[in-house]
Image (cartoon, rainbow, N blue to C red):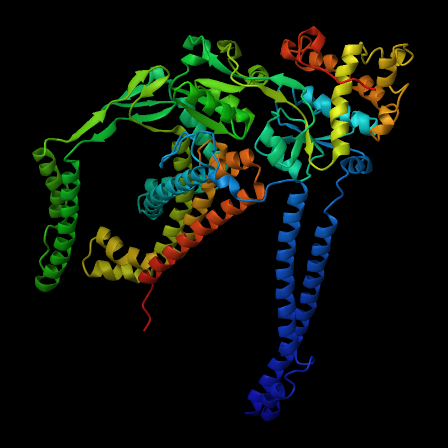
């Protein structure tokens, strides 16, 4: 009996000790929980993206993971391309340095979620501006940097002359794009059958087409041309003449931050206006002393565009000097000075038969 | 002394110095703060989403999806709703998982038993299978199978023609479609009747064996009934079946059923990978049965095959089933890797395209997670019930 009591006593003591340890542990856990809850409240950051960018000293930009001419790291790991240069222009405008950009490569499937969640400051992807994206995703498009349309690529050996001959084809597409939706519309309205093979990753789509899994590769024509770069037998394929949709590609920002939307919008418009006024990265310094009031206003020698946008006085000079005007960016990455050799087409300036048009800067 | 100890709690029951009371208070505090945290996260998420203009409703469920899915087991077209697209994804996930579980189990048992074979070559082949397959990441294996399947197969115009109007090309395996006419129902009825007869005959045969010790030719009778009866009825009603032969038209064969390479690659990859784990579970299960059982069975005059089937495996199953359950769950969850090789499973359709087209990330992810949770819970419940039937009955 005594022995039993002793053990009981000991057990009781260990129990108390155990409880004590558990108690302190629990306190630690509680502290952690409270901390986490507070952290959650604090991390509900301010809506002023521009302040965050200035504070961090770097612009976080979501781009295509790998599309030749649009967004691709070169062999030194430096990002180059058309949408990449747009990001660099925004960085030059806000931070005065086109190199202060952190690029986050995103698949089409993940791009809007990344923007919604605040993982990136701006989305410069080959994303199509649509009404539903502007209204129901919590994002806003800031303009159109590339007017595109959806097309089809087929192998020459198929002897197909028109998209109307594509009945029964299997078609490789990227998931979560307007491509998927346009295809369904087009084939339904022409009473043709087809079957899609979808991947989240653009590279996987091109690879599947290249290996013969599909008869047709469908995407925006810019992407189709760019994807030739990664095909083993690029010359065996042709792009069909029909475009089945309008695809205005543009940058997007989160809703509820008008200031940031303005910065994103006018960075692009200033590049277009600079081309129209003949300002290039080479002559921008001389142009500052031009007599043309339009040029003087654009470059900040007159007026208060920089101040009104909450940017420095030299922001537009920084953009044009470090990145170039719209035409320079186009030619360098996807136009005649690039391997892609795309025509300006719809993307020529409005006074040269295209659609690129900047409202007056005044 | 014992009195003091026993009486102590009741006397100080409401004191903060009592470890038990403090314990309860801590537990309560923890529960309340966890609850508060959960509510906090929910409220915060909701208000953040509202502030950013992201829709929080499930209204998208009944909107037209507007995109196509190439492999569907239930009716679906571009005019169907997002909700129907969700069900297509669920069914496709279940389809590949269940087929994968069957194949992986069969392959796993064969390899596991082969590894114990006294034949040196057989056991070493099984051992190298297990060691190679289970040590390579599943995703790489899936990509290997997908690319191996695609690369090896010809384009539609150069299809490999197999007997019976079956064609194989890099769009998949195309088999003739079976079309049923009037009278086909009678054949199905005949098959049903044969099945019922077989069940009755089987239990009669068992009782007869228990009573007289004589074995009836159960297998032959069952085979004859299951095949013979429907066949006779089929011929009597005038063969109410025709086959729609696939025909090369335009880009690919038209008519007939198509088995897609994406599905084949996923099914093969999942089965082969999981089978290597199941093989090890089977081997350990069998080895855990004491050797005396085998010797006793041999001493009774049972042949090696019967020893395995009637003595070893039933006992090994008790050890095998619980870890087998977790392999089944793994296979089901791993089927979400389909997204990398383009098979339209739940993740690819719903957490991929639907999420992106609707922008309802939180809702879609919550639904997807719940579906996998529900599938896993149902599956382990079924396996637990199965396990209880095999467990040793303790009296």
In the displayed structure image, the side of residue A63 where residue B113 appears, left or right: left
B277 displayed left or right of A319: left
Image position of A100 with respect to A222: above or below: below
Q: Is residue B393 above or below residue B259?
A: below
Q: Residue drawn 58% across and 37% down?
A: B359
Residue B177: x, y in percent? Answer: 26, 28
Q: Quadrant of residue A339?
A: top right
Quadrant of the image occupied by residue B36: bottom right
Q: Is residue B342 left or right of residue B308?
A: right
Frontmost residue, B118 versus A125: A125
Percent coordinates x, y for residue A118 in the rendering: 69, 39
The location of residue A203, given as percent across then percent down, is: 55, 25
Count of numbered tags = 0
Residue A255: x and y in percent read 69, 36
Identify the residue at horizontal 70%, vertical 6% (top origin). A352
Residue B247 vertical placement versus B278 (above, below): above
Q: Give the image quarter of residue B288.
A: bottom left
Between residue A262 and residue A251, name the one nearer to us: A262
One can see residue B232 in this view = yes
Horizontal side of B242 relative to B148 (left or right) equals left
Instruction: Say if residue A75 shows up in the picture.
Output: no
Point out the image quarter for the N terminus of chain A: bottom right
Residue under the image location 68 percent in, 10 percent down: A348
User: Is A54 or B151 nearer to us in this picture?
Assistant: A54
Q: Quadrant of the C terminus of chain A?
A: top right
Q: Nearer the viewer, residue B142 or A238?
A: A238
Name the residue located 7 percent from the left edge and 35 percent from the top edge.
B236
């Amino acid at each position: 009996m005594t022995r039993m009591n002793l053990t009981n006593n000991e057990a009781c003591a260990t129990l108390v000790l155990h409880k004590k340890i558990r108690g302190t542990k629990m306190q630690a856990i509680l502290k952690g929980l409270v901390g986490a809850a507070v952290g959650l409240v604090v991390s509900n950051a301010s809506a002023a993206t521009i302040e965050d960018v200035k504070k961090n000293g770097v612009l976080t930009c979501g781009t295509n993971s790998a599309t030749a001419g649009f967004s691709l790291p070169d062999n030194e790991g430096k990002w180059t391309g058309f949408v990449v240069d747009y990001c660099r222009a925004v960085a030059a405008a806000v931070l005065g340095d086109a190199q202060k950009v952190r690029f986050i490569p995103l698949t089409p499937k993940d791009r809007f979620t990344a923007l919604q969640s605040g993982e990136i400051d701006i989305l410069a992807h080959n994303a199509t501006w649509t009404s539903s994206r502007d209204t129901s995703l919590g994002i806003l498009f800031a303009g159109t940097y590339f007017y595109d349309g959806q097309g089809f690529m087929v192998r020459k050996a198929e002897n197909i002359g028109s998209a109307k001959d594509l009945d029964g084809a299997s078609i490789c597409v990227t998931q979560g794009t307007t491509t998927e939706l346009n295809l369904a519309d087009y084939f339904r309205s022409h009473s043709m059958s087809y079957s899609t093979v979808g991947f989240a990753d653009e590279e996987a789509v091109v690879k599947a087409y290249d290996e013969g899994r599909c008869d047709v590769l469908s995407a925006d024509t810019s992407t189709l041309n760019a994807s030739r770069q990664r095909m083993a037998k690029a010359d065996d394929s042709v792009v069909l003449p029909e475009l089945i949709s309008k695809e205005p590609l543009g940058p997007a920002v989160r809703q509820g931050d008008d200031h940031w939307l303005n910065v994103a919008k006018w960075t692009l418009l200033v590049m277009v206006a600079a081309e129209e006024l003949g300002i290039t990265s080479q002559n921008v310094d001389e142009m500052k002393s031009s007599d043309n009031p339009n040029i003087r206003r654009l470059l900040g020698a007159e007026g208060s565009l920089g101040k009104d946008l909450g940017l420095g006085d030299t922001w537009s000079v920084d953009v044009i000097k470090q990145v170039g005007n719209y035409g320079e960016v186009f030619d360098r990455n996807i136009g005649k000075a690039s391997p892609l050799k795309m025509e300006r087409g719809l993307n020529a300036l409005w006074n040269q038969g295209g659609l690129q048009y900047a409202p007056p800067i005044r | 002394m014992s009195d003091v100890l026993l009486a102590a709690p009741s006397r100080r029951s409401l004191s903060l110095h009592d470890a038990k009371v403090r314990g309860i208070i801590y537990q309560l505090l923890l529960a309340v703060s966890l609850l508060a945290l959960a509510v906090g996260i929910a409220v915060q998420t909701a208000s953040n989403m509202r502030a950013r203009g992201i829709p929080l409703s499930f209204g998208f469920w009944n909107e037209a999806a507007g995109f196509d899915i190439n492999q569907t087991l239930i009716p679906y077209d571009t005019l169907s709703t997002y909700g129907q697209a969700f069900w297509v994804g669920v069914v496709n996930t279940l389809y590949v998982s269940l087929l994968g579980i069957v194949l992986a189990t069969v392959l796993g048992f064969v390899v596991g038993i082969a590894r114990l074979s006294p034949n040196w070559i057989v056991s070493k082949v099984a051992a190298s299978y297990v060691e190679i397959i289970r040590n390579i990441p599943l995703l790489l294996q899936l990509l290997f199978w997908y690319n191996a399947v695609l690369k090896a197969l010809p384009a539609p115009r150069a299809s490999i023609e197999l007997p019976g109007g079956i064609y194989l090309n890099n769009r998949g395996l195309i088999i003739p479609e079976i079309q049923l006419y009037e009278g086909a129902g009678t054949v199905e009825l005949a098959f049903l009747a044969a099945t019922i007869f077989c069940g009755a005959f089987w239990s009669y045969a068992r009782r007869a064996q228990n009573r007289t010790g004589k074995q009836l030719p159960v297998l032959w009778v069952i085979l004859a009934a299951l095949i013979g009866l429907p066949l006779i009825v089929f011929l009597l009603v005038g063969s109410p079946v025709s086959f729609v032969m696939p025909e090369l038209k335009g880009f690919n064969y038209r008519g007939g059923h198509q088995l897609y390479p994406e599905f084949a690659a996923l099914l093969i990859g999942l089965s082969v990978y999981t089978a290597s784990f199941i093989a090890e579970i089977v081997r350990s299960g069998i080895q855990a049965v004491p050797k005396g059982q085998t010797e006793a069975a041999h001493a009774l005059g049972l042949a090696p095959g019967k020893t395995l089937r009637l003595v070893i495996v039933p006992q090994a199953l008790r050890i095998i089933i619980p870890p087998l359950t977790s392999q089944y769950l793994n296979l089901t969850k791993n089927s979400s890797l389909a997204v990398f090789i383009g098979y339209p499973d739940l993740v690819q359709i719903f957490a991929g395209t639907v999420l992106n087209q609707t922008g309802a990330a939180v809702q879609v992810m919550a639904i997807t997670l719940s579906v996998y949770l529900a599938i896993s819970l149902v599956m382990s419940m079924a396996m637990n019930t199965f396990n209880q039937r095999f467990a040793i009955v303790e009296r």
